[in-house]
Image: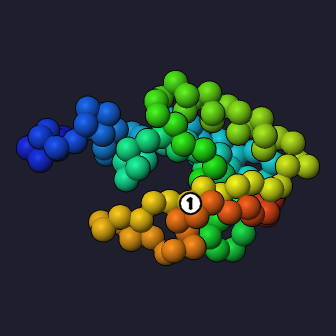
Amino acid sequence: MLNIFDELFLTPEQREVKNSYEDRKIGFDEIGGLFVSTVYATDLDKYETAIGDAAPRDNIHPVERYEDKIKAEAGHKRWIEWCKNQANTTITRLGTPSTEDWPIAEEDTKDREITLVRGKDV
């Protein structure tokens, strides 16, 4: 249920998907020891796909952002196909903008190449 603040200050898209991960989720799939999660990221006011791997820490990596749900659905399908190829292990992890409300460590604001760790069960 939305409160008066939500009604006044959130965009219609933010209001529609404000609640839980399940409400914001476009897709979640486990493939080849990785997982692909695409959601509406309320902090960015965009849709985002992230790849999760079996690394012991820092194992969720944003890889693509979208302006609308249709592009997010198509992107989610592309990343599923990418994960099916076991030879694919290197991605560009997207940086996250730092804001006053959501401070981010300097190194996490920049895009960087990483090597994924595939597991048996992620």
Q: Is residue 56 left or right of residue 118?
A: left
Q: What is the tally of numbered marks visible in this picture?
A: 1
**Where does the N terminus fall, quadrant-wise?**
top left
Eyeballing the image, is 68 above or below 32?
above
Residue 97, percent from left and from top = 45, 60
Residue 75, percent from left and from top = 63, 33
Residue at image coords 67%, 31%? 77
Q: Which residue is at the front of the view, 19 or 109?
A: 109
Q: Which residue is at the front of the view, 110 or 13?
A: 110
Q: Is residue 97 left or right of residue 89?
A: left
Whether residue 52 is visible to the viewer of this picture, yes or no, is no
Q: How is the image coloured?
A: rainbow
Helix, strand or loop for disc 1: loop
**Where does the C terminus fall, quadrant-wise?**
bottom right
Q: Which residue is mark 1?
A: 95
- What amino acid type should be assigned to the residue bearing mark 1? Gly
Residue 86, percent from left and from top = 89, 48
Residue at image coords 41%, 50%? 44
Eyeballing the image, is 76 above or below 56?
above
Q: Residue furthest left?
A: 4
Residue 73, percent from left and from top = 57, 29
> Dot 1 surroundings within 10 Å: few (below 14), some, or many (20 or more)?
some
Residue at image coords 48%, 29%? 69
Q: Which residue is at the front of the view, 106 or 23?
A: 106
Q: Residue furthest right?
A: 87
Q: Is residue 83 left or right of residue 62?
A: right
Whether residue 43 is visible to the viewer of this picture, yes or no, is yes
